[in-house]
Image (spheres, helix red, strand yellow):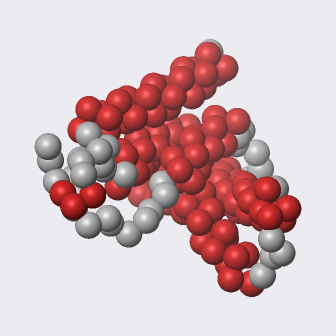
Amino acid sequence: MSSTDPTAAPEHRAPRRAHADYTGAVYGSMLAASVVIGAGSPGEFPRLHLVLLLLVTGLVFWIAHVHAQLFGNRLAQRPLDRPTVLRVCREEWPIVKAAVPPALAVAVSPLLGLDVGGAAWLAIAVAVAGQVGWSAAGARQAYASWRQVAGTATVNLLLGLAIIAFKLAVTH
C-alpha cells in the first residue's frame, strides 16, 4: 500500500495536506464557458462587455453561493458571526477566481490578432482547460489515485466539450 493511500491504516498515512476545495473553481470555470457561449457581442466595445460579463457573473454567483451556504442549513444550526461569514466568503471565492483567466484571455485577444469571435473561442478554451485542471488538482489534493484523477479530468473535459458542442449547434 502507498503511504498516500487514504484507506491505509492511520499510522501509515502521509500527513494530511492543507485543505483546499476546488469545487468552486471547477464550477466557476464551467460557468465562465457558459457565459461566453450565451453572450452576444453587444455594443461598441464587445470585448470589454464580455470581460465585464464574465467578472460580474462570477461575482453574482459567488454572492449566491455565499448566501446559500450562510442561510441554508447553517442558519438553522447556529447563529452567524463574522468569522463564519468570512470563512464562507473565502471558501466560495474560487468561483470568482475561475472567471479571471477567461476574462484575461478576452482582454489580451487583440494582442494575439483575434477578432471578437476568436476571443470568445479562446475564452471558452481557457475556461474548459481551467475546469479540467481544477478538477484534477482537487482530486490529487484529496489523495485520489491517478486513475481517479484521469476519470474526473475526463468527465470535466466531456462536460466542457458538451458546452462547446452546444455553442457550435447554436451558432450554425
Q: Residue furthest bottom?
A: 82
Q: In this rendering, would 152 be left or right of 98?
A: left
What is the quadrant of the C terminus in the image?
A: top right
Identify the image quadrant of residue 15.
bottom left
Answer above or below: position of 158 versus 69.
Answer: above
Q: How many marks?
A: 0
- Locate residue 151, reporting x and y percent: 35, 30
- State the residue in front, 43 or 106: 106
Can residue 68 be seen? yes
- State the residue in front, 161 or 94: 94
Give me the residue at 83% from left, 75% from top: 79
Give me the residue at 46% from left, 44% from top: 131
Answer above or below: position of 57 versus 153.
Answer: below
- Locate residue 32, reporting x and y percent: 60, 46
Q: In this rendering, would 2 be left or right of 50?
A: left
- State the residue in front, 41 or 2: 2
Can residue 103 be seen? no
- Locate residue 49, reporting x and y percent: 70, 55
Q: In this rendering, would 69 be left or right of 54?
A: right
Identify the image quadrant of residue 95.
bottom right
Answer above or below: position of 82 versus 147.
Answer: below
Give me the residue at 49% from left, 31% from top: 160
Answer above or below: position of 52 versus 40.
Answer: below
- State the residue in front, 171 or 22: 22
Give me the residue at 80% from left, 71% from top: 78
- Locate residue 157, reporting x and y percent: 42, 31
What is the quadrant of the N terminus in the image?
A: top left
